[in-house]
Amino acid sequence: MNSPSNKRVLIVDDTSVMRSLLKQIIKSKGFDVVGEAGDGHQALKLFRELKPRVVCLDIEMPEMNGLDVLARIKEEVPQTGVVMITGDSQASSVKKAITAGANGYIVKPFNGTRVMEAIQKAMEDQ
């Protein structure tokens, strides 16, 4: 199940520092970060081109928020794992994300172990 082709991750966050941090954590565990996006429209474009196994997705972004991106991803390729990594800790946002099909929800600031556990779980859920 976890052959290299199954370890493809797309990182979506409007902050370049956060994308770099996530990329470093994910790559250090042997996963392939296939792309990075800074807004929702770019995220969907890269998602369609790169076909990642898991998407790490922020909620608060310009152009299109992460909940809308999540809904589109699950509509187009339901078996894609999606881990929300966001500063939004409101119960309503967590509920919306899980209802829309998110496999995990991590509130910033986070630790690398928790991120990798959520990515692993997202892969196993599918």
Image (tube, helix red, strand yellow):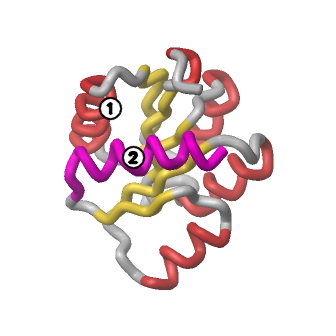
Tag 2 near tag 1, CB within 8 Å: no
| On screen, residue 116 above or below 93 | above
Q: Main secondary structure of the magenta part?
A: helix
Q: Residue at x 52, y 25 (%)?
A: 2
Residue at the disc numbered 1:
26
What residue is shown with label 2?
13
Q: Which is more toward the observer, 124 or 60?
A: 124
Q: Position of residue 122 (x, y in %)?
A: 53, 47
Q: In the displayed structure, would residue 4 be above or below residue 111?
A: above
> Up-down: is 112 above or below 36?
below
Is residue 113 on the magenta stretch?
yes
Q: For the point 76% across and 41% down, which residue is it?
A: 77
**Is the N terminus in the top left, top right, bottom left or bottom right quadrant?**
top right
Q: Residue at x 62, y 52 (%)?
A: 69
Q: What is the total number of numbered labels drawn onto the structure image? A: 2
Amino acid identity at mark 1: Ile
92 with respect to 100 (left or right)? left
What amino acid is at disc 2?
Asp
The residue carrying pointer 1 sits among few (fewer than 14), some (14 to 19) or many (20 or more) residues within 10 Å by Cα, namely many
Q: Start and end of the magenta stretch?
A: 110-126
Tell me which label, 2 or 1, sits earlier in the chain: 2
* Residue 16 drawn at (x, y percent): 28, 38
Q: Position of residue 19 (x, y in %)?
A: 31, 38
Q: Nearer the viewer, residue 86 or 41?
A: 86
CA separation, marks 2 and 1?
A: 14 Å
Q: Is residue 50 magenta?
A: no
Q: Secondary structure at mark 2?
A: loop
Residue 107 in picture, x, y percent from top left: 32, 65
